Image (cartoon, grey):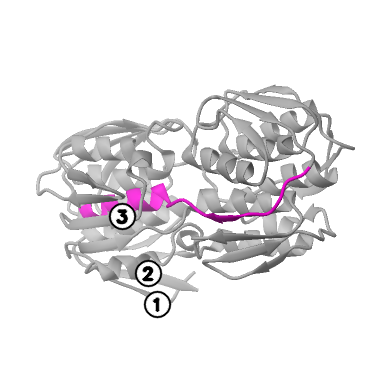
Amino acid sequence: MYKIVIRGGHKLRGEVRVSGAKNAALPILASSLLAAGRSTYRNVPDLGDVVTMKKLLRQLGAKVEGDGSTTVDSTHITNFEAPYELVKTMRASALVLGPLVGRYGQARVSLPGGCAIGARPIDQHLKGLAAMGARIELEHGLVNARAKRLHGATIVFDMVTVTGTENLMMAAALAKGCTTLENAACEPEVEEMARVLNKMGARIRGAGTTLITIEGVDELHPLDHAVIPDRVEAGTLMVAAAVTRGNVLVKDCLPEHLDAVIAKLQAAGVEVTVEGDAVRVLGRREIRPADIATRPYPGFPTDMQAQFMVLMAQARGQSVLSENIFENRFMHVPELRRMGADIVVEGHTAIVRGPTKFKGAKVMATDLRASACLVLAGLAAEGTTEVLRVYHLDRGYEHLERKLRGLGADVRRVKGEL
């Protein structure tokens, strides 16, 4: 096992490139199951979750080769079960459910796992598949779904769900007739999923809005596609520049996907300038307090709440951070307190009082975004910080310590405790 050791106090300076988006790459890889033939996906990030998805596709019978440029041949799928051993580590494994039922009429998928940040059931996925004619049975922690051929339906999500929207879009692409998804997720990754499916021959309209229509077709074909940049990695690097009072150009991103993050950084007194497909962040000595409330896109992303909390701990005054997506997403707070932060949690709200000068400490990551938050706190801290359980970080950030080191941070990965 490894840990990340950070000697804080260095201002980040220079340029850094954003990797492909984890939350786009995973459903795109799953969509390869919808077509016979060899698809090529470029700009695929080297992440733990991507490795898991590739293992799952291979277990189903697909031929998967390459890393940054990945090819998947799903011509001969021979297995229709996603086992607990793989699904327990990554909730996105459930994304094979829609494609398998849509193309092959059957799937057996373990109920998913992933980060322990709250209940994230797949009931909306199952409700939608049932409306499209699938027979759903739950037994021994497994979902069994069968259908001769799915048919179009009108599906109204009870809550906004990104993976649910993506799963049902994939299933509906090969269904007979027209499917309508109401209260659909509007995230850029959903738009990307529709873009990929349409390139494969699907007929999807409305992605990026709350109303998506899918006109089913008889078959889809493989494609060549480059994955969009990761907006959460871009946001994390932007906050890293701000907390170290640095000057960083975050390159190869899509600034239009970062409007909510940019607005809150600017509200905190950070200078942010869009330069084409890049964003320059210039940290200021004095950080102003700013309140945030996480919301589905285009609101402030829940995946940036922990990182922004580090910045608000440095602000002079009180900030209120409300978490409206996941109920257990303040597990990083005790670790930030160990580093000196003054944070009080009341229900789904965290009250942050600053300014705090973080002190280096040994801390433990509890989930993916919490691990990034602790790395950022270490960059801003006096002394040395050790972040344990960095396997969480590796699920969603491609070589983050290398990128930070390239900007002047004193950060290294060493063998150590769990």
Per the image, the residue denoted by label 3 is: 237
Are the residues tagged 2 and 3 within 8 Å (C-beta)? no
Residue type indicated by callout 1: Val
Q: Which stretch did the figure color magenta?
A: 219-241
Query: Element at badge 1?
Result: strand
Left or right: 9, with 164 as reference point: left
Residue 219, label in figure = none
Looking at the image, residue 386 lies above or below residue 247: below
Local packing at callout 1 (Cα closer than 10 Å; few below 14, some 14-19, many 20+) is few
Residue 216 x/y as whole percent: 74, 33
Q: Quadrant of residue 258?
A: top left
Q: Is residue 358 visible?
A: no
Q: Quadrant of residue 214?
A: top right
Let me know if residue 227 is in the magenta part.
yes
User: Spatial distance from mark 3 to mark 1, Cα to Cα?
Assistant: 22 Å
Left or right: 26, with 236 as reference point: right
Per the image, the residue denoted by label 2 is: 4
Per the image, the residue denoted by label 1 is: 414
Residue type indicated by callout 2: Ile
Q: Quadrant of residue 150?
A: top right
Query: Element at badge 3?
Result: helix
* Residue beneath the point at 62% across and 56% down: 89
Are the residues tagged 1 and 2 within 8 Å (C-beta)? yes
User: Spatial distance from mark 1 to mark 2, Cα to Cα?
Assistant: 6 Å
Query: Element at badge 2?
Result: strand
Between discs 2 and 3, the one toward the N terminus: 2
